[in-house]
Structure formats: structure tokens, C-alpha cells
Image: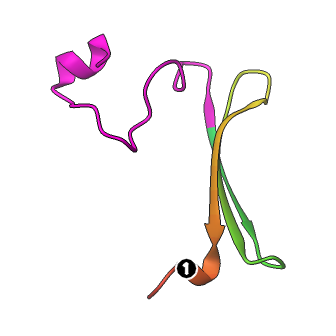
Amino acid sequence: MTAFGARAGIRPAPRRFSGPTFLHNTVGMVTLDRETRQVGFYILDGNDKTVLSHGFAMDALHA
């Protein structure tokens, strides 16, 4: 557990991000591609390099 997580009372979880993924110079981006029907989530560093990404098909969403 990181020092931040210990102070906030957050316990480690298998799907929780840890380590140097989120820094003061990172930015989040969401993409929606209607042609391929894909959703993408990205975390970029200060040089626009992808640090972490995840995507899924729009069809996986249920109303």
C-alpha cells in the first residue's frame, strides 16, 4: 500500500491502480469511435505518451 493509500484508508485491490501511474503531470483522455463502436480510456504523461489504457466495445454497454 502506498503512503497516500495508507493515509486515506484505501486498501489495495486487484483492479486499483498503484505506483507512479497518476502524477501531477498526467492527463486523462476518453475516445469514442463510432465507426468501430469502441470506447477507449487513456492516461497520458507530460509527453503525450500513453501510460495506461483500457478499451471496450460500445455494444457491451446496456441501458
Q: Position of residue 53 (x, y in %)?
A: 65, 45
Is residue 19 on the magenta stretch? yes
Q: Magenta residues, as a range? A: 1-27
Looking at the image, the residue that sits furthest to the front is 14
In the image, residue 48 above or below residue 37: above
Q: In the visual, does 49 lie left or right of 19?
A: right
Q: Position of residue 54 (x, y in %)?
A: 62, 52
Q: Secondary structure at mark 1?
A: helix
At 44% across and 88% down in the image, what residue appears? 63
Q: Amino acid at mark 1?
A: Ala
Q: Within the image, what quadrant is residue 40 found in?
A: bottom right
List the residue tagged with mark 1: 60
At 19% across and 16% down in the image, what residue appears? 7
**Label 1 crowding class (10 Å Cα cut-off): few <14, some 14-19, many 20+?**
few
At 64% across and 59% down in the image, what residue appears? 55
Is residue 43 on the magenta stretch? no
Q: Within the image, what quadrant is residue 31 found in?
A: bottom right
